[in-house]
Amino acid sequence: MTVFEGRFTDAADFRIAVVVARFNDLVTSKLLSGCLDCLSRHGVDTQETSTQLDIAWVPGSFELPIVTKKLANSGQYQAVITLGAVIRGDTPHFDVVVGEASKGIASVSRETGIPVVFGVLTTDTMQQALERAGIKSNLGWSYGLQALEMCSLMRTIDSGIS
């Protein structure tokens, strides 16, 4: 039996893209900050001159899948992290955006074989979103860690089955 697991200590040569929704940027910018902090603390160069990290801003969560797919298809990244925040309102718009964003992001990972981290908060209130983006804890950190684990896991599987 072979057991495959990802690690968080060999991130210095991973190339990662982050796609961030500008809508609700009060929340998404905090998620990005937490994500970058995690990546940096695990050896990814997050400076503006970095060749390991690229960040793409899109208008909203609905647009995350198309840019995520373009980046994943480029062959330049070991993982793509998507960050967004969709907050329930008085209309069914929330359900449409969340459904299409989640299906689209999941399909990118399946179609390209590149790990895509789903970092889109779906909350009922702005307060809940802010709590998840830093007031209580910052899920951006977790999304960064998930990407590192998946990069390492994919590399481990590739070397273990070749």
Image (cartoon, grey):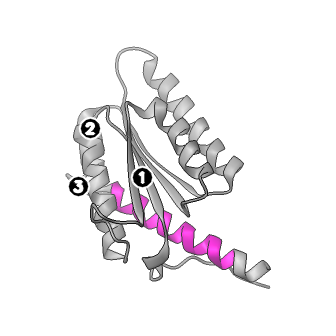
Left or right for 62, reference 23: right
Task: Assess whether residue 146 is covered by the magenta stretch.
Answer: yes
Instruction: Determine whether 111 is above or below 37 in the image.
Output: above
Task: Assess whether residue 151 is covered by the magenta stretch.
Answer: yes
Give the mark, 3 or 2, whose residue is nearer the N terminus: 2
How would you classify the magenta stretch by its main secondary structure? helix
Q: At numbered mark 1, what does the secondary structure look like: helix, strand or loop?
A: strand
Query: Which numbered disc covers residue 18?
Result: 1
Residue at the (19%, 52%) spot, across then down: 135
The amino acid on which the numbered mark 1 sits, given as a three-letter code, is: Val
Residue 50, given in percent of the width and then of the height, sits at 34, 66
Q: At numbered mark 2, what does the secondary structure look like: helix, strand or loop?
A: helix
Instruction: Determine whether 139 is above or below 60 in the image.
Output: below
Label 2 Cα neighbours within 10 Å, binned few <14 / some 14-19 / many ≥20: some
Instruction: Determine whether 95 is above or below 130 in the image.
Output: above
Q: Tell which tag, 3 or 2, sits nearer the viewer.
A: 2
Give the mark, 2 or 1, whose residue is nearer the N terminus: 1
Q: Tell which tag, 1 or 3, sits nearer the viewer.
A: 1
> How many marks do you count on the picture?
3
The alpha-carbon separation of the residues under discs 3 and 2 comes to 18 Å
Give the mark, 1 or 3, whose residue is nearer the N terminus: 1
Residue position marked by numbered label 3 in the rendering: 136
Residue position marked by numbered label 2 in the rendering: 25
Residue 86, given in percent of the width and then of the height, sits at 38, 33
Q: Are marks 2 and 1 in contact (CB under 8 Å)?
A: no
Q: Tell which tag, 2 or 1, sits nearer the viewer.
A: 1
The amino acid on which the numbered mark 3 sits, given as a three-letter code, is: Lys
Query: Which numbered disc covers residue 157?
Result: none
Give, as a single range, the part of the protein colored magenta. 139-157
Q: Quadrant of the N terminus?
A: bottom right
Between 131 and 15, the one lying in front of the other is: 15
The alpha-carbon separation of the residues under discs 1 and 3 comes to 23 Å
